[in-house]
Image (cartoon, grey):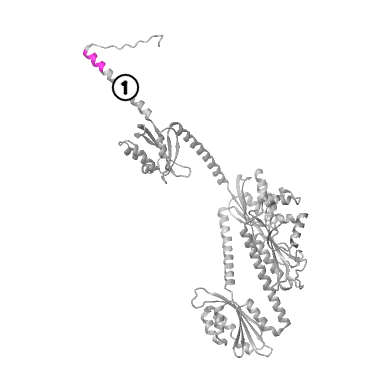
Amino acid sequence: MNRTSDMETEVKGNSGISLQEFCDLDQLYRLLDNWSKSSGMSAVIVDTEGNRTSESFGMTEFCQMIHDNEKGAAQCADIMKSDMEGIYTCPVGFCDFSIPIVLPDGQVLGKVLAGQALSVDQKEEDILQKTAQLGMDAKMVKDVLSRVHRKTETEMQGSYALLKEMLSFFIEKNYSIWETNNELKKAPAKKDRVLSQITQIMYSYNLTVDLETESYTLITGTGMERTVEEYKKHDHQEELKQFQDSIIHPAYSNRFNELLDFESARNNPSENGFRGSLEYPVLYPGDSAYEWHEINVFIDTEEDGRRIANILGRDITEAHNALEKNQKELRAAAAKNQILSELTKMLYSYNLTLNLRTGKYSMIIGTGMTQFMEIFKSTDDYEIAYNKKLSYLDQEHVPQFAALASLESLRARTNAHGFIGNLEYGAITDYGEEWHEINVFISTDETGEPIANILGRDITEAHERQEAKERELKASAAKDQILSDITKTLYSYNATVNLNTGKFSLIIGTGMEEIIQHFSRTDDYEQACEYLLEKALPEYPAEMNRHFSLQALREQQNRRGHLGQIEYAAVTENGIGWFEVNGFMGVDEEGNPIANILGRDITEIHEAQERRENELKAVAAKDQILSNITKTLYSYNVVVKHFCNTCG
């Protein structure tokens, strides 16, 4: 990424020093670019006069729209020239940062302006009002705002703090190294002092070894405290060997000792400069985890002719672990790509990886969607494939498809990261009417290029199953309504018992108020049954348990339809009442075994039946008496039924 040529003006401080004099601008730009990609925010460098000196990294669609507006651009220019620092709100309501570029001596070279983030708490109406004052179209503003990813206050504070710390470290480190090099050029006599500064900034120690005597002097920096403490106890290199061999991993000992064997350097006066470096693991006594250290060895000849070696050591544990983590992530990424390929083949018809800058794509192919696979294989140009695909789509779904998956729409969402939407749509292909689904994700690839992943699959069967399910649900709802109406018309209650859980729901009809009141206090079927058994006359509980206890119902759960009915007498507040229970077995929509227990009050029916039976018994008794009288007193008894035409 070479962006140095983009600089239009130099970033200079009061003493005339420019940013590019002491730091690698490409490296700085990469830092800002990577921060922008990871945070989803923008960043730009401006000088002390408010002039841009770099490109805008991660410029958002919304802010580009403001910059394209004459009044909006003027407001932004005023902000760039202001002395504001820290987090602030821009004139149209977005969150921005201003971080000065300050040298260790206090000189200000310019600043980094960053942010362009929208708070989760910011009201859209306020932004519309402010952009209206700039003469901007409300519909266009709302459309762009709908694609802005909002940030929490914690996210914005964290992004600001990270950028500020990264920038400060970068400037201080590069300036210190540049200043040190200048010192070396101007005053070679100050070499020791400069070398000390370098050690303190970048290393844990610097051993300067006299090759003739193997005695050494020590300059200390930061880190590797236990090694440095051991080195302070001695003044001869050979005395360090036992300590070094005791902590360095055996696999690295030979190379370490080769670097520090100066016999050849003593015999070869022409050997000067960098001799080599080594990264190696060490395990201190009592530790369970290795640290990683690095040494760099230089051979030099002093002005007085003495031959010396400089051994610079530092702790690189964090960097090594980060590298190891990065390598694991790369391996994981490769594994992820393999998994993604396998998942695509199992679950999707295709996974199209589209480079949003070039409009070209690559593809992992799964199964199904034969018509569209033929289109995708015929080209790698997304717009060509997209336009061919549109001709097969149900016209009702074309606008939604374009809003989600057209190249123009995807490019407008370049700054979005992660899942941005999915769509189910109908298509008429050579193979018949089909239903398809796409899922769209936006991200960047390993090189920083913006990409979209579009995963498509054929959901025709699933769609048909869903339609069938919806029809079943409607039928089920209608059935439930009918069942409710029947209960309310013919029964006092309908208890639907889940035989897995023993819980029940209740539809209430008319009558049996005392029992209904008790049922309404619980959803436990066994508790409800206990109350019924308690109120039933003694001769009925055994039969009731045999037919309708939870255990009896579970034993019959594979049956379907009517289980039977019983009539029983029970004590109520109004005396002895008669009741009827009917049981039906089935399954619910989720496949759970259920029983419907329907109860009603048949006291009046039972009493009417008793009266009828008593009347029949009375008639039979009367006939018997009359027969006995006839047999005793008469020869016969003729019963004449007279019919008249008038009476019928």
The question of residue 577 being in magenta is answered with: no
Q: Is residue 7 left or right of residue 199?
A: right
Would residue 486 be found to the left or right of residue 230 on screen? left
Q: Quadrant of the C terminus?
A: top left
Three-letter residue code for mark 1: Leu
Picture coordinates of residue 333, whole percent (x, y): 58, 63
Mark 1 = which residue? Answer: 616
Question: Badge 1, how many Cα within 10 Å: few under 14, some, many 20+?
Answer: few
Residue 111, how many percent across, how many down? 72, 66
- Foreground of the two, 182 or 373: 182
Return the residue nearer the eye: 314 or 434: 314
Tell me: residue 526, above or below residue 295.
above
| 429 in relation to 243, above or below | above
Q: Main secondary structure of the magenta part?
A: helix
Q: Which residues are magenta?
A: 625-632
Which residue is nearer to you in this view: 127 or 407? 127
Residue at the left extreme, as displayed: 632
Q: Secondary structure at mark 1?
A: helix
Residue 599 is drawn in which quadrant?
top left
Q: Position of residue 314 (x, y in %)?
A: 60, 77
